[in-house]
Amino acid sequence: YQVDDTIVIKELEQIGLKTSHCNAIIGPFRLHRPQIQQALISRSLHLSQISKGEPPSWRLNYTLSTKALPNVNSASVFLNIPIKNVTVGAKEKPNNLGRSSNNKDLSFAISGQKLKALVHELRSAREVMRKFDDL
């Protein structure tokens, strides 16, 4: 959440914006940085929000062809992660994703390649966490 202005400009240029447009965007970004950071933090999924009682589920769809594209041959995975609310004292606080009922699911589709990258990143994070457990 602490991104330097020069990095933001470089990232915007990488997606094809002109330097003058990037410089115009960075002004309001600087002005509203705390609000942007707070919005991103409040909408992030936290490990404590994942329901321990119900494991994540997944479904694999493999598309061979469509009417528009006769030869697709692509796999996509639909992930479903159960999310619980966070309780503070006697009050129930909605989770950071703005959900207010006890258990909601976070569902999304992901390509096979992105799933492999996600699994790799999660395994790396688990190894880092194990190192801290050993301290």
Image (cartoon, rainbow, N blue to C red):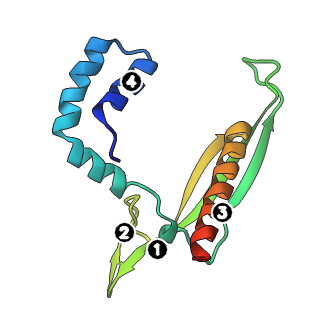
**Which residue matches tag 3?**
127
Most extreme residue toward the bottom, as rendered?
90
The first of marks 4 and 3 along the sequence is 4
Other residues around mark 3 within 10 Å, as few (<14) / some (14–19) / many (≥20): few
Q: Is residue 90 above or below residue 57?
A: below
> Under tag 1, what secondary structure?
loop
**Badge 1 is on which residue?**
102
Q: Residue at x 43, y 72 (%)?
A: 85
Figure check: 81 above or below 77: below
Give the side of residue 52 with respect to residue 43, left or right.
right
Label 2, on which residue?
A: 94
Asked whether the beta carbons under mark 4 and mark 1 sit within 8 Å of each other, the answer is: no
Which residue corresponds to mark 4?
10
Q: Specify the quadrant of the image occupied by residue 7.
A: top left
Give the position of the C terminus as an image quadrant. bottom right
Looking at the rendered structure, the kind of residue marked 2 is: Pro
The Cα atoms of the two marked residues, 4 and 3, are separated by: 31 Å
Q: Nearer the viewer, mark 1 or mark 2?
A: 2
Select label 4 or label 2 by which is in front: 4
Which residue type does callout 4 highlight?
Lys
Q: Nearer the viewer, residue 45 or 11?
A: 11
Task: Tell me which residue sits at (61%, 58%) in the image.
Answer: 125
Amino acid on which the number 3 mark rests in the picture: Glu
Q: Secondary structure at mark 2?
A: loop
